[in-house]
Image (spheres, helix red, strand yellow):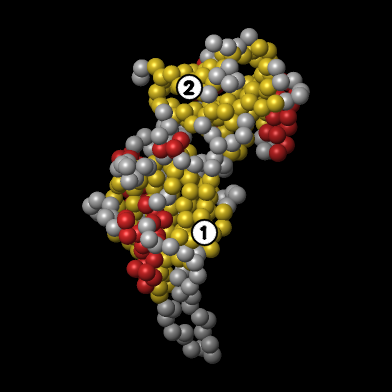
Amino acid sequence: MARFRFLPLAAACIATAALALGTPASLSEAGPDDEKRAKDKAAPAGPTYRNKSLGVRTSGPAGWRMVADKLGAVSNWKRLATWNGKDTDGQAVLYTRPRSATSLDALMGSVRKEWTKSVGRLRLDAMRKVEKSALNPVAKVIVDGSFTRKGKTAKPKDGVPPPPAASTPMRVQATYYLGQGHEFLLYVTTRASHWTRLRKSLRRMRDELGFDKQVTDAPTGEGSYRNEKLDFSCRFPKNYSVVQPQRQHHIVKFVGISGGDPAFSIYAFPYEGDAAADARRLVTYYTEDKAGEAERRRIEVSGTEGAEIDAKAMIDGADMRIWIAVIKRGDICYRLRCVIPSEEEAKGAAAFRAFVGAFRFGS
């Protein structure tokens, strides 16, 4: 049983369709969130997406088809799943990225900046923020907009100009969620003529986007973490979130407020080889599988000799610097990992040394 002992104590981006269409220069702020949530829960749900490692789940409207993505990104957003509505031109896309905003107001400011700096045919009708509460476990910013989609113009026939292409009014709603370690974006478009019919289903999808506890209530502070079962302890930086990953052998993760902060993880798994053998596997992974760079050197952690991996690789579309300390104790191999954007290399190197230096086996 792990226990925690605490000591005293951006910018959101617009999905592909929005970038292609642009945004106007004016924004308006609406009032409180919709008061019809109880009625909306009766709206039938469609296919469900769930990601245990990120702790997020949601269901699309009934009758829509869903495709879960393995890869794909919009700027620094990674696409997770797409729902498509037949005969409505409706589409909902769920994205995620490491958290960059320090607060809900900061998130709203960055969203406002991104939407207003673009130009085009997209009209932004409203923007509002929804604070975290019992009904809203994750704070969010909701943006409503609209645009007119022009149809394809036919080619002239026998020298006669074709009639003007038909236009289709479209509605847009983008919802930005501010989680502990990640931000999420649900970007929805559909024909304006179908918006009223789909509104309840789409509102339910937006408001009932589900999050596991580590996304909403991860403990923070400057303190220590101890795992009784594996008999080790470590320290994590001030204001970091402590996340219990839903992945085998991933024991604990510590993440900062900003995507530019180093992220720390501890892994433990049965392994027959020694620390050097596992380190060689990691070098092969980063140099061959990830087409990056990696080198191995000796290191000592809690009086135990091991191996250190110093690597550079692309992770989720970004250049990252990775340090991993590998040690073996009994039949268990441990990995102490630190990851940070390459431009923050100096900060990451110092943070890794401090993290490894504070790791201890025993009481």
Disc 2 residue type?
Answer: Arg
Residue 315 visible here = yes
Q: Residue furthest left?
A: 31
Q: Is residue 171 above or below residue 260?
A: below
Q: State the residue in front, 341 or 71.
A: 71
Q: Is residue 215 above or below residue 237?
A: below
Contact? badges 1 and 2 (CB < 8 Å): no
Q: Which of the 4 image quadrants contains residue 295?
A: top right
| Residue drawn at (44%, 78%) of the image | 165
Q: Secondary structure at mark 1?
A: strand
In this rendering, the label closer to the viewer, 1 or 2:
2
Q: Is residue 20 left or right of residue 147?
A: right
| Residue drawn at (53%, 87%) of the image | 157
The image position of residue 233, as x and y in percent, is: 53, 17
Question: For the C terminus, which image quadrant?
Answer: top right
The residue indicated by pointer 1 is: 47
The numbered dot on residue 93 is none
Q: Secondary structure at mark 2?
A: strand
The image position of residue 289, as x and y in percent, is: 70, 39
Q: Is residue 330 above or below residue 83?
A: above
Residue 337 visible here = no
The image position of residue 120, as x and y in percent, is: 38, 61
Q: Which of the 4 image quadrants contains residue 18?
A: bottom left
The image position of residue 131, as x and y in percent, is: 30, 43
Disc 1 residue type?
Answer: Pro
| Residue drawn at (53%, 45%) of the image | 51
The residue indicated by pointer 2 is: 3
Q: Is residue 201 left or right of residue 27?
A: right
Q: Is residue 162 left or right of residue 324?
A: left
Q: Is residue 159 left or right of residue 279?
A: left
